Image (cartoon, grey):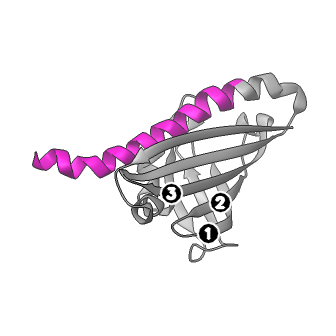
């Protein structure tokens, strides 16, 4: 069984800049702060240059380390990956997560969409997974996109 969670937001920048924010291992952890039982990211370590087939280690604030394998990398249009290595209690709910980021320009900047399709570890826990993913993960994703937006607006605010 699979569950899909999505978040979308306009950012005041070009798709190139939005793509860079979403894929930069030094910047992204500050944006993904988590929400509730969905933990934030403390760091990302690349095994090789970011490209299709490359792997990254995603260090979470709770001490767990997830593996991210890049499935699609088409700057500045799409970036997709599979996330594995969840530990309990999340591992009881989720076997893996497949993410896809898409970036499109519009007259005010960029439209960023982030979709996650989670494969559930146990079908009978689907009601719990539904709450955790749709309530907490979606909120963490929206918060992340909002943090990305704030990072772009901060210099303009400081000079006003």
Closer to the chain start, of discs 2 and 3, is 2
| Front disc: 1 or 3 | 3
Q: Residues within 10 Å of mark 1 (few under 14, many from 20)?
A: some
Disc 1 to disc 3: CB gap under 8 Å: no
- The answer for how far apart the CA atoms under marks 2 and 3 are is 15 Å
From the viewer's perspective, is 35 left or right of 99? Answer: left
**Helix, strand or loop for disc 2:** strand
Residue range corresponding to the magenta coloring = 131-160
Disc 2 to disc 1: CB gap under 8 Å: yes
Q: Which of 113 and 83 is in front in this view?
A: 113
Which residue in the rendered view is the most extreme toward the bottom?
A: 49
- The answer for how far apart the CA atoms under marks 2 and 1 are is 6 Å
**Helix, strand or loop for disc 1:** strand
Which residue in the rendered view is the most extreme toward the left?
A: 160
Residue 27 occupies quadrant: bottom left
Q: Is residue 57 visible?
A: yes
Residue 81 occupies quadrant: bottom right
Q: Residue 46 carries which label?
A: none
Q: Mark 2 points at which residue?
A: 80
Q: Which of 18 and 95 is in front in this view?
A: 18
Q: How crowded is mark 3: few (under 14 residues within 10 Å), some or many (20 or more)?
A: some
Q: Name the residue under label 3.
A: 104
On the image, the x and y values in percent for residue 107 come to 37, 53
**Helix, strand or loop for disc 3:** strand
Q: Count how many numbered circles sit on residues in the image.
A: 3
Q: Mark 1 points at which residue?
A: 73
On the image, the x and y values in percent for residue 79 come to 60, 62
Q: Is residue 37 visible?
A: no
């Amino acid at each position: 069984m699979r569950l899909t969670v999505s978040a979308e937001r306009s950012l005041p920048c070009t798709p190139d800049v939005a793509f860079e924010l979403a894929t930069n291992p030094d910047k992204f952890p500050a944006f993904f702060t988590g929400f509730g039982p969905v933990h934030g990211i403390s760091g990302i370590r690349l095994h090789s240059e970011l490209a299709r087939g490359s792997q990254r280690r995603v260090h979470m604030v709770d001490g767990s380390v997830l593996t991210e394998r890049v499935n699609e990398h088409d700057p500045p249009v799409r970036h997709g990956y599979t996330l594995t290595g969840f530990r309990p209690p999340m591992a009881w709910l989720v076997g893996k997560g497949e993410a896809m980021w898409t970036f499109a320009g519009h007259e005010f900047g960029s439209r960023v969409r982030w979709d996650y399709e989670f494969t559930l570890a146990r079908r009978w826990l689907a009601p719990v997974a539904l709450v955790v993913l749709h309530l907490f993960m979606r909120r963490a994703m929206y918060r992340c996109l909002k943090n990305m937006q704030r990072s772009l607006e901060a210099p303009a605010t400081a000079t006003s």
